[in-house]
Image (cartoon, rainbow, N blue to C red):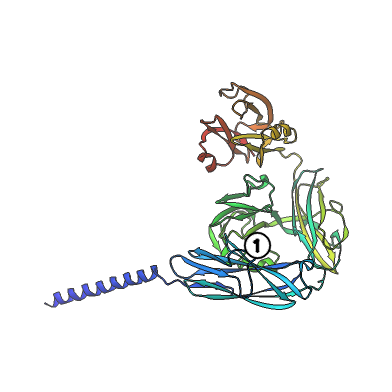
């Protein structure tokens, strides 16, 4: 009898524990919807007529399931036309961008009244609200309605029509001159504007070496910019040719004035580098949750990336004191508003560039509302191979601003390469080293430039052979091969157009495969170094072998 009672008690305890777990699990799965907003109040500072300022609020659903929310124009503000409400539906995180614009004085009805526009933006909607405001300080309450509770956020700002002190604004604030052969030069441009209202008087000069300075160890890290002028498709970011061995992208990356920005959702960037540390530079970063970092597959904890934009000029230290060896930094972009500028690889000795190797034109000027463009040139001259740097010092209003410059001088005997550009017209792809010589053909065929596809070798490079091009007028298709016979392909109807460069027929040091794809429906070919080629597969292309090896 006693055993039976114990068995019953045991069963009851087990059943109670099971029911408790089920209840806890169900409770966890159905957490109530709660809307959290950070920050709750934001100061946008002083806004002069003709200027704008903005801030970003993060909205999070602390419960489970989807949460819908809406925002209206603040009290007293009116939309110029249409609805005065926007609605958004998100599962976990969303953002609300608030921008305040004071229209220029010549558009104001009276100098004592400012015509002000408030722009409320979500990922896919925009609400415009307008109001006449007096000069001085203002605090506006923006009400947000949701299933997870109603909230109010506050934006404070000050309106001014008085001319403000001249303010120097430079872009970029760091210069990567790339790699230069001895005797060659590299040029970059700096844009200079005045963000103030008074006349800006400025001058610029290259910083001279200091007495008893060890010029061979001027700096201990090299800056590498992600800036690219290569576009593979509309709105997409393309890895520059000189970064393809270092950078690998996964997901959707968009082009933001030449810099990479991850599209909606999580997108990954892998950077391979050798050094003792690495610093990441950001142009924009809404909050600490926007970027995830992993060094050699281990998570890295850093400060709030939104604070580094203003306080540290976009500089986000990631790791220091590493073994001077190969490493991989993995960046996970969790927000489409994050823009990545570049990195600095620590541990490399940077010599000060000798006097005269850096030239800036012009060296002085006055700026009110116009934009000035300064040309900065670095000359390799007879410099020994290695890394070089310099400080470009701007002086304005008795204040100095420094733009760092970095460059690499290559050995004279380095393998010479030729950039090959890809142009597309429908499904026909034209690859050329000299677009200026193919301008007539490009114009007739309405070809669209897609940037640098790969690099071929110079004709005298050992282990390489010419890479030839043919064109079929009837098919409107190009074909490429390193054999003049076409390597066994049927070239009936094709016209021989000569070589576009040299390709390796076996793998050379640091070379990569150039894959050939064929579309049996159209009879057209496509060439790429991308191992995935997901987009081309979707369009009916099949893998057709390795055309050769390129850089």
In this image, 81 relative to 201: left or right? left
Q: Position of residue 87 (x, y in %)?
A: 53, 65
Q: How many marks?
A: 1
The answer to which image quadrant residue 59 occupies is bottom right
Q: Residue at horizontal 75%, vertical 74%?
A: 113
Task: Give residue 341's position: percent from left, percent from top.
Answer: 67, 57
The quadrant the N terminus occupies is bottom left
Q: Quadrant of the C terminus?
A: top right
Residue 426 shows in the view: yes
> In x, y percent, where is residue 529?
59, 40
Q: Quadrant of residue 461?
A: top right
Residue positioned 66% across, 40% down in the render: 448
Determine whether, in the image, residue 319 is placed left or right of residue 439: left
- Along the horizontal axis of the image, is 366 left or right of 43? right
Quickly name the residue at label 1. Answer: 284
Quarter of the image where one finds residue 30: bottom left
Is any atom of residue 532 visible in this view?
no
Vertical comparison of 123 with 33: above or below: above
Residue displayed at 73% across by 32% down: 440
Q: Is residue 367 left or right of residue 78?
A: right
Q: Nearer the viewer, residue 63 or 408?
A: 63
Q: Residues within 10 Å of mark 1 (few under 14, many from 20)?
A: some
Q: Secondary structure at mark 1?
A: strand
């Amino acid at each position: 009898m006693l055993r039976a009672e114990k068995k019953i008690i045991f069963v009851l305890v087990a059943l109670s524990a099971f029911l408790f777990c089920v209840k806890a699990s169900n409770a966890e799965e159905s957490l109530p919807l709660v809307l959290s907003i950070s920050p709750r109040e934001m100061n946008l500072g002083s806004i002069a007529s003709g200027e704008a300022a903005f801030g970003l609020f993060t909205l999070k659903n602390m419960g489970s399931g989807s949460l819908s929310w809406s925002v209206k124009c603040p009290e007293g503000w009116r939309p110029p036309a249409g609805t005065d409400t926007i609605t958004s539906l998100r599962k976990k995180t969303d953002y609300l961008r608030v921008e305040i614009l004071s229209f220029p004085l010549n558009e104001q009805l009276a100098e004592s009244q400012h015509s002000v526009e408030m722009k409320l933006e979500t990922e896919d909607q925009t609400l415009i609200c307008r109001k006449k405001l007096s000069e001085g300080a203002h605090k506006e309450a923006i009400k947000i309605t949701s299933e997870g509770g109603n909230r109010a956020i506050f934006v404070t700002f000050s309106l001014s029509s008085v001319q403000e002190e001249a303010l120097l604004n430079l872009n970029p604030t760091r210069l990567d001159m790339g790699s230069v052969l001895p005797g060659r030069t590299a040029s970059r441009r700096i844009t200079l504007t005045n963000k103030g209202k008074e006349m800006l008087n400025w001058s610029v000069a290259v910083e001279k070496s200091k007495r008893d300075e060890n010029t061979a160890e001027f700096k201990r890290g090299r800056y590498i910019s992600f800036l690219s002028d290569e576009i593979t498709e509309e709105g997409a970011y393309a890895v520059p040719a000189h970064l393809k061995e270092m950078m690998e992208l996964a997901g959707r990356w968009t082009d933001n004035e030449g810099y990479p920005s991850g599209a909606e959702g999580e997108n990954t960037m892998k950077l391979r580098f050798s050094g003792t540390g690495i610093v990441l530079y950001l142009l924009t970063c809404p909050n600490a949750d926007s970027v995830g970092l992993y060094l050699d597959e281990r998570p890295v904890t850093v400060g709030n990336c939104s604070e580094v934009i203003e306080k540290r000029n976009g500089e986000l230290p990631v790791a220091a004191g590493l073994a001077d060896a190969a490493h991989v930094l993995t960046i996970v972009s969790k927000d489409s508003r994050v823009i990545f500028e570049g990195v600095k690889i620590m541990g490399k000795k940077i010599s000060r560039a000798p006097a005269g190797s850096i030239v800036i034109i012009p060296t002085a000027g006055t700026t009110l509302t116009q934009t000035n463009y300064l040309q900065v040139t670095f000359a390799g001259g007879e410099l020994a191979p290695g890394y070089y740097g310099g400080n470009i010092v701007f002086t304005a209003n008795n204040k100095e601003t420094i733009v760092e410059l970095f460059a690499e001088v290559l050995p004279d005997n380095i393998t010479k390469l030729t950039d090959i550009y890809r142009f597309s017209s429908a499904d026909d792809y034209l690859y050329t080293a000299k677009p200026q010589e193919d301008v007539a053909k490009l114009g007739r065929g309405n070809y669209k430039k897609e940037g640098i596809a790969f690099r071929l070798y110079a004709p005298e490079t050992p282990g390489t052979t010419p890479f030839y091009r043919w064109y079929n007028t009837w098919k409107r298709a190009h074909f490429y091969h390193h054999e003049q016979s076409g390597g066994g392909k049927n070239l009936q109807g094709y016209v021989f157009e000569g070589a576009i460069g040299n390709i390796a027929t076996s793998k050379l040091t640091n070379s990569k495969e150039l894959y050939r794809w064929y579309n049996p429906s159209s009879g057209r070919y496509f060439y790429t170094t991308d191992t995935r080629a997901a987009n081309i597969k979707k369009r009916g292309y099949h893998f057709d072998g390795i055309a050769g090896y390129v850089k």
